[in-house]
Image (cartoon, rainbow, N blue to C red):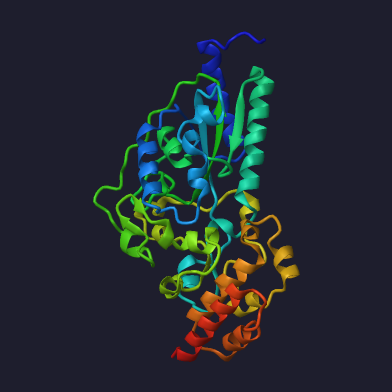
Amino acid sequence: MAPPLTDADLAKLRARLDALARELGFDQVGVADTDLATDEANLERWLAERRHGGMDYMARHGRRRSRPAELVPGTLRVISLRMRSSAPDAAPASAVLNDGARAYIARYALGRDYHKLLRGRLAELAARLTAEFGPFGHRAFCDSAPVMEKPLARNAGLGWIGKHTNLINDRAGSLFMLGELYTDLPLAPDAPAKDRCGTCTACLPACPTGAITAPYQLDARRCISYLTIEHHGPIPEALRSAIGNRVFGCDDCQLVCPWNKFAEVAAEPDFRVRHRLDSADLVELFAWSEAEYLEKTEGSALRRLGYGRWLRNLAVALGNAPRSAAAAAALAARAGDADPVLREHVAWALARQAQAG
């Protein structure tokens, strides 16, 4: 067994951690302890109110989500890291949202799947630290296990959780992704970030479906990101018109956040736009075969939808699109689809197209 690291060793390790994180493309790194008692209580109240909708996995792991050492025995600290994720070459979000004939895809999902990229960088970070300082207990996560990544990032000093429930950094806004290393290294924790939302409530009225029910309160059942990504089955009809042309995720609450005036696009080339999906035509996307969908979403976060939900979301967007013969024809071509969920959404969209001005 290797001798325990001294305080001097841990200080050197922390300095190397910061340097290696920058070399691997991370924008910031911090260290948190594992105390999430307040966040655990908030999570359990949110679950009891059923605000997680169909995301049963949020409750499935019990308190291992809020007690890191129960998920990974021996965990003493959590190393939290962030990386800018907004596609650097994407069309302006506002221009796409204002063109109802085009598909809006959340800006983080236009390039390579961030899960794969960040997990690979986290593994490399741990390997380099091991090579320099010897073996240590660790496990890497990137939205891949029951981890309270935003509270941990807040506690590690990476930002505060804003009124829209996303993490905000005072130098970088909120357009970034998070990854974590659970570790048994007794590193000194960083100071938690302080809430700097102040009196601003711009994100609340910006939510198209009213999912932000109060400051710091999100009802996932109304959230467009949940409805278009996590939710299986029919999208509630009462919420469809508010979805507009958003076919994968929603950035509205972040687009109006004044802190995002400091946000920068991703430096990572893998986050560049693929297949012109930053402003693609809805009719064109709806015509994709399953083989085309699988080819063009390979290595992308869009793949998690599956072809059926991809078409379901596009049908809703076409129902909300300006009236056109092309949209109506595209919908009519799938009116007899074998999937009953898609058929129902297509019927709704055709009725909307017939009514559109």
338 above or below 187?
Answer: below
The image quarter containing residue 203 is: bottom left
Q: Is residue 190 above or below residue 322?
A: above
Indicate the position of residue 150 as horizontal and vertical percent values: 44, 42
Percent from the top left, x then y, of residue 311? 61, 72
Horizontal side of 23 relative to 290 (left or right) equals left
- Residue at the image position 62 percent from the left and 87 percent from the top: 332
Where residue 345 sits, quadrant-wise, is: bottom right
The percent position of residue 288, horizontal first and vertical second, equals 69, 74
Q: Residue at x 50, y 66 (%)?
A: 92
The one of 236 and 27 positioned closer to us in this rendering: 236
Q: Position of residue 248 (x, y in %)?
A: 54, 64
Residue 239: image quadrant is bottom left
Name the image quarter holding the C terminus: bottom left
The N terminus lies in quadrant: top right
Q: Residue at x 60, y 27 (%)?
A: 138
In the image, 336 versus 260, the foreground residue is 336
Whether residue 23 is visible, yes or no, is yes
Decide: is 182 above or below 39: above
Residue with the most extreme top position = 3
Side of 204 relative to 333 (left or right): left
Q: How many marks?
A: 0
Task: Work out whether residue 276 can be spotted.
Answer: no
Q: Residue at x 67, y 27 (%)?
A: 128
